[in-house]
Image (spheres, rainbow, N blue to C red):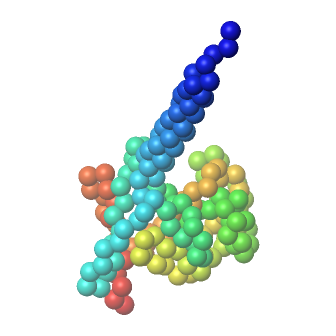
Amino acid sequence: MNSPPGRLAGRWLLALAWIAGLFLASRFFGDWEQKQENPNREVASTHGAGFVEVRLQGNRQGHFVANGRVNGQAVSFMIDTGATEVAIPSQVAGRLSLEKGAPVMLNTANGATQGYRTRLSSLELGDIRLAQVSAVVVPGLPGEQILLGMSALKRLEFTLRDGNMLLRQNTQR
């Protein structure tokens, strides 16, 4: 016996509603998870008399991750006060077309490896802008995040309070 035409259409509409609901839920939770990993996707800056400040919120692991720019191209940074230099994964360096400088031996958490020096024409985090930043390209550094080390951070004042990091660049020089 055949089902009435309205019943078949109702089943199709119910199936489409479930598919749409699952799609919207996966989008919502995907965005939520990205916000948990990088709560600083949109970096806001504060300007004062002779300075610019950026306040970063720590993620659920306590790391400070933020979006920024290197040589005008969008990147993701992880603040690493224990890193001597700005450290760039080799796949990111390739995407940024960074020039290979002198080879250098690097001591990483995974042991010794050889990388190469490079120089970043510009580095931006919110309205903080640094020029001619020394960096190293680290083969085998996983992921897409650039470790923002002391070769950049030494040009800024930074403080940590209540799970937030405040970065300040003096603009009067």
**Residue in the picture at 31% in, 51% down:** 163
**Which of the 4 image quadrants contains residue 23?**
top right
Q: Is residue 58 left or right of residue 131?
A: left
Q: Position of residue 20 (x, y in %)?
A: 54, 37
Q: In the depicted view, which residue is nearer to us: 151 or 120? A: 120
Q: In the depicted view, which residue is nearer to us: 147 or 40? A: 40
Q: In the depicted view, which residue is nearer to us: 161 or 48? A: 48
**Residue in the picture at 49% in, 73% down:** 124
Total number of numbered discs in the rendering: 0
**Which of the 4 image quadrants contains residue 154?**
bottom left
**Residue in the picture at 45% in, 59% down:** 41
Question: Does residue 26 appear in the picture of this structure?
Answer: no
**Residue in the picture at 44% in, 49% down:** 35
Q: In the depicted view, which residue is nearer to us: 76 or 24? A: 24
Up-down relation of residue 37 to residue 16 (above or below): below
Q: Quadrant of the N terminus?
A: top right
Up-down relation of residue 69 to residue 172 (above or below): above
Q: Quadrant of the C terminus?
A: bottom left
Q: Position of residue 72 (x, y in %)?
A: 58, 76
Q: Is residue 100 left or right of residue 5?
A: right
Up-down relation of residue 43 to residue 101 (above or below): above
Q: Position of residue 27 (x, y in %)?
A: 51, 43
Question: Does residue 7 appear in the picture of this structure?
Answer: yes
Q: Position of residue 158 (x, y in %)?
A: 34, 66
View extreme (top): residue:
1
Q: Is residue 166 left or right of residue 61?
A: left
